[in-house]
Amino acid sequence: MKTRAAVLHASPVAAPYAQSKPLRIEEVELAPPGMGEVLVRVRAAGLCHSDLSVIDGNRPRPVPMVLGHEAAGEVEEVGVGVTDLKKGDRVVMVFVPSCGHCAPCSEGRPALCEPGNAANGVGELMAGGRRLSQNGKPVHHHVGVSAFAEHAVMSRHSLVKIEADIPHEIAALFGCAVLTGVGAAVNTAKVRAGETVAVVGIGGVGLSALLGAAACGAARVIAVDLSDEKLRIARELGATDTFNAGSPDVVEAIRAATKGGVDHGLEMAGSVKALELAYQVTRRGGTTTTAGLANPAHTMALAPVRLVGEERTLKGSYVGSCIPVRDIPRFIELYQRGRMPVDKLWTSSSPLEGINEGFDALNEGRTIRHVIQM
């Protein structure tokens, strides 16, 4: 079949994207779903910094590619071997398909699935190859999803069926921002009631981490960002304290306010400076967790003597250390009960044709989550 999609033909591309237009709305060929695959009608897709990092070259991927990984939609057709989904089922897409058999999957860590991550790295689906093409030439998949399109074919392992009757625009956010941010607080850091938390980087993922820490019962949740507007939003979503990261004495101020530092520093900005800040405001014996994907070439200086002498823990969190089939329904239920106002992350939207302008808004910090409505 043919479908419309936002195709990235080259990377890096410089902003402003409304002028450079890295994503072109074009017609592509989409092969039918193969063994263990599903054809999905995409209804909503969020714009994330992980997509932006492919456009600006911070996270190189093979091109041409149809981007988009945070999305929700409806099943249109299932391939051979898919027996637990049917036409009309509502699904949320997950950007790491999990085979269920490799060592990480068997340990309950599907985010680290070896075949899934290998396929994502080369722009293929889990079964191998590509289902997208244009003028007879293959087009790569973005992390097995490629949701900036009206239709997508993906592995059954990239989908979580949901029963909740919530708007597609909200459901989409659970596929990345909420999984990554809430999961980092709940699963990776394991924030406990009464502890103190600092979240550095208040975008969609950072605000989700803030919501996750609050849901865990953290006594103080401190938001840290360069944008005063984002800090205002953080206060609306439950931050007990806010600090502008641009202040020259921000580390000292946070450590003074928390009498030596926080129990958990959560870095969600995807930059080394943000990670260093999160580490510096974490107390002796505390845990610093990073879910931000910095440029692979960037490194951080770390004094091992502090790691040892202060019994520090520095942890990475990918997909929030989540088991998506377990956690997405749980997080949706918390949202439905009013304990996790995920809907407030959705700040703007547009049709597919407005995607480049949407990435400008994301790049300039003018939106939390811009959602493409198909």
Image (spheres, rainbow, N blue to C red):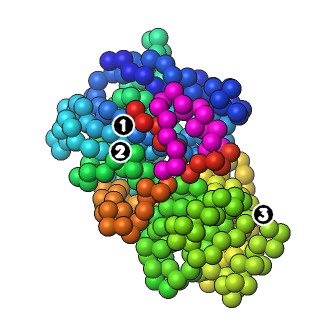
- Give the residue pinned by disc 2: 168
Q: Position of residue 338 (x, y in %)?
A: 36, 67
Asked which secondary structure carries label 3, the reply is: loop
Contact between marks 1 and 2 (CB within 8 A): the answer is yes
For image coordinates 49% across by 61% down, the residue present is 208
Asked which secondary structure carries label 2, the reply is: helix
Q: Is residue 20 magenta?
A: no
- Give the residue pinned by disc 1: 43
Q: CA distance from mark 3 to mark 1?
A: 38 Å
For image coordinates 42% across by 22% down, the residue present is 4
- From which residue to which does the magenta span run? 346-363
For image coordinates 29% across by 41% down, the residue present is 156
Apparent side of residue 273 relative to residue 371 in the rendered image (left or right): right
Q: Position of residue 280 (x, y in %)?
A: 72, 74
Quadrant location, the C terminus: top left
Which of the two discs, 1 and 2, labels the residue nearer the N terminus? 1
Q: Main secondary structure of the magenta part?
A: helix
Which of the two discs, 3 and 1, labels the residue nearer the N terminus? 1
